[in-house]
Image: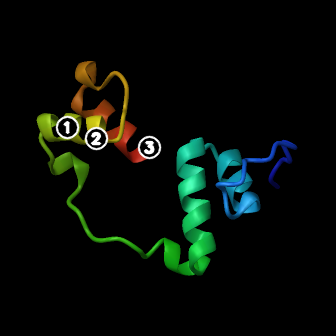
Amino acid sequence: MAKNTGKDPGPSVKDPKLYEDLRDEGNSKEKAARIANAAANSSRSKVGSKGGQSGSYEDWTVDDLRKRAGEIGIDGRSSMKKDELVEALRDH
């Protein structure tokens, strides 16, 4: 059961209920807002199937992982080991 925080996520979030459910699951604010807005713009069942296929992060080089982490603004990436970079990218 989702807990009600009583906080309005703001006008930029199109599906506040889904946003709060995702936050309760431990997702970041950014990720929860991105998923909630994508779900509001199409059917929820289609959100998970959107996007292309990319290789597993385990197949990437550390330099490529750091570059991608930099593109999306992950702090501390320069001192992270490969497994830490992979985890940070997946959790973003």
Lateral position of residue 80 relative to residue 32, left or right: left
**SS class, disc 2:** helix
**SS class, disc 3:** loop
- The amino acid sitting under disc 3 is His
C-alpha gap between disc 3 and disc 1? 14 Å
Crowding at mark 3 (Cα within 10 Å: few <14, some 14-19, many 20+): some
Q: Which residue is under mark 2? A: 71
Q: Quadrant of the C terminus?
A: top left
Lateral position of residue 82 relative to residue 12, left or right: left
Q: Which mark is residue 67?
A: 1
Quarter assignment of residue 38: bottom right
Q: Marks 1 and 2: CB-CB under 8 Å?
A: yes
Determine the residue positioned at 29% across, 71% down.
Answer: 52
Quarter assignment of residue 29: top right
Q: Nearer the viewer, residue 44 or 86?
A: 44
Crowding at mark 1 (Cα within 10 Å: few <14, some 14-19, many 20+): some
Q: Quadrant of the N terminus?
A: bottom right
Residue 64 coordinates in the image, percent (x, y): 15, 41
Determine the residue positioned at 38% across, 37% down.
Answer: 88
Residue 90 coordinates in the image, percent (x, y): 39, 46
Q: Marks 3 and 1: CB-CB under 8 Å?
A: no
Q: How many marks?
A: 3
Whether 56 is drawn above or below 43: the answer is above
Of the residues under marks 3 and 1, which one precedes in the sequence? 1
Lateral position of residue 32 relative to residue 3, left or right: left
C-alpha gap between disc 1 and disc 2? 6 Å
Q: Which mark is residue 92?
A: 3
- The amino acid sitting under disc 2 is Glu
Determine the residue positioned at 21% across, 34% down.
Answer: 66
Residue 49 coordinates in the image, percent (x, y): 43, 76
